[in-house]
Image (cartoon, rainbow, N blue to C red):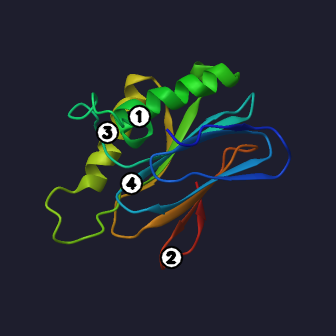
């Protein structure tokens, strides 16, 4: 995984790329762009104000887990538990963590695999498995998204191509 950091300074902005994740505290804004079929997973502990954001690309790693360049941040089944673990190590309590997700669009009409829908389903299954409540989502459709996650208040801002920005 390329990016895993914890920021504590005021007014930090951290940009998370595809298959990356990062943590932030209080006045940190976590940002990821280019969510087409990918899903952005924002986790937050409202007491410690520790937040995490992951940009997952695919639903499941089981077919390639033994590959030399395996990146757990790329897959829903490995990114979600890893992000939870990082948050707990930073001081968050798993029983307080909540989730918000966005993405999972079907960007091409000819795609019979619908990776976006499979990504959303995989993320939701992992959250359920880890007993993390999903509080809000902006998923599916055919528009790409950029998301900004405020670690101070847990607000996820979703900017969808050609649409108004919304807070969830």
Q: Position of residue 145 (x, y in %)?
A: 48, 65
Which residue is drawn at the image coordinates 36% and 35% (left, top)? 70
Distance CA(mark 3)–CA(mark 4): 11 Å
Closer to the chain start, of discs 3 and 4, is 4
Distance CA(mark 3)–CA(mark 1): 14 Å
Q: Residues within 10 Å of mark 1 (few under 14, many from 20)?
A: many
Nearer the observer: mark 4 or 1; the answer is 1
Distance CA(mark 2)–CA(mark 3): 26 Å
Nearer the observer: mark 1 or 2; the answer is 1
The residue labelled by disc 1 is: 72
Closer to the chain start, of discs 3 and 1, is 1
**Image quadrant where residue 32 sits:** bottom right
Distance CA(mark 4)–CA(mark 2): 18 Å
Distance CA(mark 1)–CA(mark 2): 32 Å
Task: Find out whether the residues at labels 1 and 2 contact each other: C-beta distance under 8 Å.
Answer: no
The residue labelled by disc 3 is: 122
The residue labelled by disc 4 is: 38
Distance CA(mark 4)–CA(mark 1): 14 Å
Closer to the chain start, of discs 4 and 2, is 4
């Amino acid at each position: 995984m390329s990016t895993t950091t914890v920021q504590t300074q005021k007014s930090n902005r951290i940009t998370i790329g595809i298959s990356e994740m990062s943590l932030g505290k209080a006045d940190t804004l976590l940002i990821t762009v280019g969510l087409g079929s990918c899903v952005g997973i924002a986790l937050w502990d409202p007491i410690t104000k520790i937040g995490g954001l992951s940009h997952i690309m695919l639903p499941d790693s089981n077919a390639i887990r033994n590959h030399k360049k395996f990146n757990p941040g790329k897959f829903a089944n490995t990114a979600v538990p890893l992000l939870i673990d990082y948050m707990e190590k930073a001081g968050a309590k798993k029983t307080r963590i909540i989730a918000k997700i966005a993405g999972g669009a079907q960007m091409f009409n000819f795609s019979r695999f619908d990776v976006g829908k499979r990504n959303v389903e995989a993320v939701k299954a992992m959250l359920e498995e880890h007993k993390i409540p999903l509080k809000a989502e902006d998923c599916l459709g055919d528009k790409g998204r950029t998301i900004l996650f405020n670690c101070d208040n847990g607000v996820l801002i979703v900017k969808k191509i050609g649409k108004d920005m919304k807070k969830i």
